[in-house]
Amino acid sequence: MAYSLYMTRYIDTHSHVYFPQFDTDREAVYERMHASAVQTIAVGTSLRTSQQAVQAVRDTPDLVVAATIGVHPNAAAEGFDTVVFEELLATSVPRLVCGVGECGIDYYRGATDQEKAKQKEVFQAQIEFALAHDLPLMLHVRSSKGTDDAHHDALSIIDTYQKPHGEKVRGTSHFFTASLAIAKEYWKRGFATSFPGVITFAEECEKVVREAPAHLMLAETDAPYAAPLPHRGQRNEPSYVVEVVRKIAAVREEELERTKEQLLKNAQRIFNIV
């Protein structure tokens, strides 16, 4: 089915709408996105899912406006085959790929020294790939419980590449629920923080939302995971980004229209989408 949005009102900057959780009712999910004037970026987590994310853009370009391609840190054992990802990028004409990732560091469920080293290696390979193609990074960074260890390692790696390349190393830290101190480290490096549905029920996130520089914040769902209120506990979907945007506006004490416009401009600028 063809869809047409004459004016995009919301962009969910991170979803996995191609995941099997949507196989039985994907068309209905797209109908709800259209009704809510929501578009999304489909995010890859491996070579296979990156291919699926790109295909989702080909299938429904009015709603799935772009894809990111990359390898999630929890899939780091797969490695990052630059040649294969180059081929995937080359077939995306006109360019369907707007970023690299989700990539980064994840120690949440524990990681051996060997696993940590592999995650860093794969992360660095993706930064180099992003630099080679002038693409932003879609970061996934999740620390061990009660620490900021993964963030510190990720930021250290980013510093290594920003030193010679400056603002060419850019992007967003997706599903950001870490502390204000960590948020400031990303902002200092020009990275945005992307706020998920968790902010609708976790008061500890509000300080970061309130203090985020207007040009360095995004909204996302990470669908099918972590639905916002009033859908908490259900499967998440891109149309629910509306609730995230409403919460951002409320926390920042802004008019909803102002917040919507700012988030849209940010997504368009960071990911070079229209």
Image: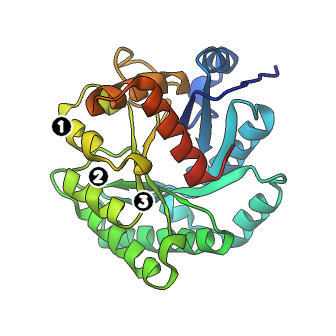
* Amino acid type for the residue under numbered disc 2: Tyr
Looking at the rendered structure, the secondary structure element under dot 2 is: loop
Q: Residue 269 carries which label?
A: none
Residue 14 rendering spot, x and y as whole percentages: 52, 41
Q: What kind of element bears circle 3?
A: loop
Residue at point 82%, 22% (across, down): 2
Please tell me how crowded label 1 is: few (under 14), some (14-19), or many (20+) other residues with Cα within 10 Å.
few
Q: Name the residue under label 2.
A: 108
Residue at (28, 29) in percent of width and height: 253
Q: Is residue 204 visible?
A: yes
Residue at label 3?
191
Left or right: where 11 falls relative to 48: left
Residue drawn at point x = 55 percent, y = 50 percent: 45
Q: Does the CB distance between marks 3 and 1 fall below 8 Å?
A: no
**Along the viewing direction, whichever of 202 and 218 lies nearer the viewer:** 218
Write down the residue under mark 1.
Answer: 204
Type of amino acid at the residue the image marks with label 3? Phe
